[in-house]
Amino acid sequence: MFTGIVSAKGTVSSIDRQEGQARFTFASKELDMRGVKLGDSIAVNGVCLTVVDFSTKSFSADLSRETLGMTTFANCQVEARVNLERALALGDSLGGHMVTGHIDGVGTVRSVLPDAGSVCLKIEVPELLARYIAKKGSVCVDGVSLTVNSVFGAVFELMIVPHTQVATIIDGYEPGTPVNIEVDMIARYLERLMQYTSQ
């Protein structure tokens, strides 16, 4: 489980693709690797990945065909920047919202417009995901917990404050940038519950 509060930025240092799956290695001078063990979970651009190898400044993880197919990692290249967050520990502060690290789909940045010191970001999601995006609700974009300002069909608007721009890879977004989307888990479970109660 994660909070959507990015703790570090990093880069993809190597990719070994084999038979539909891939091993990615991520490097970061910022991520605190103290106490990391094999099998630990680290969210990379919002994707919960399992550590299979690590050093003081990097770690590797295997991405399955399913993970590659559901995320932006399918077309990711070496040197791509990534957001990183270690898994939530019991007693840690929940600064964002409850994030599972299970990506629902890929959205596309439609516009990036300065707004005073902030940035107004508009993202379009697949129609099947649009129903889970609610005004003033939570959404996770590339592992960043954000509040939805408004919704226009399959497009939603976010206001990115200066701190978030500096602390994440959002400062590099431009129209056309693909992003990993995880919708609010409460919305997913509520829909499932409604399916059963309406029968």
Image: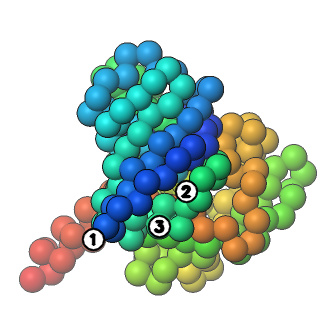
Q: Amino acid at mark 2?
A: Val
Q: Mark 3 or mark 2: name the one nearer the start of the chain.
A: 3
The residue that appears at 36% across and 32% down in the rendered structure is 53
Which secondary structure, mark 2? strand
Which secondary structure, mark 1? helix
Q: What residue does disc 2 label?
A: 141
The residue that appears at 69% across and 74% down in the rendered structure is 176
Q: Which quarter of the rendered picture does the N terminus lie within?
A: top left
In this picture the colour scheme is rainbow
Q: Mark 3 or mark 1: name the one nearer the start of the chain.
A: 3
**Contact flag, marks 3 and 2 (Cβ < 8 Å):** no
Q: Amino acid at mark 3?
A: Ala
Q: Nearer the viewer, residue 192 or 46?
A: 46
Q: What residue does disc 3 label?
A: 74
* Image quadrant in which you'd find residue 185: bottom left
Q: Residues within 10 Å of mark 1 (few under 14, many from 20)?
A: few
Q: Mark 2 or mark 1: name the one nearer the start of the chain.
A: 2
Measure the alpha-carbon separation of dots 2 and 1: 21 Å
**Label of residue 191 in the image:** 1
Measure the alpha-carbon separation of dots 3 and 2: 17 Å
The residue that appears at 43% across and 43% down in the rendered structure is 43
Q: Nearer the viewer, residue 57 or 48?
A: 57
Between circles 3 and 2, the one closer to the viewer is: 3
Report x, y in % for residue 103: 40, 60
Relative placement, left or right, of 122 versus 98 is: right
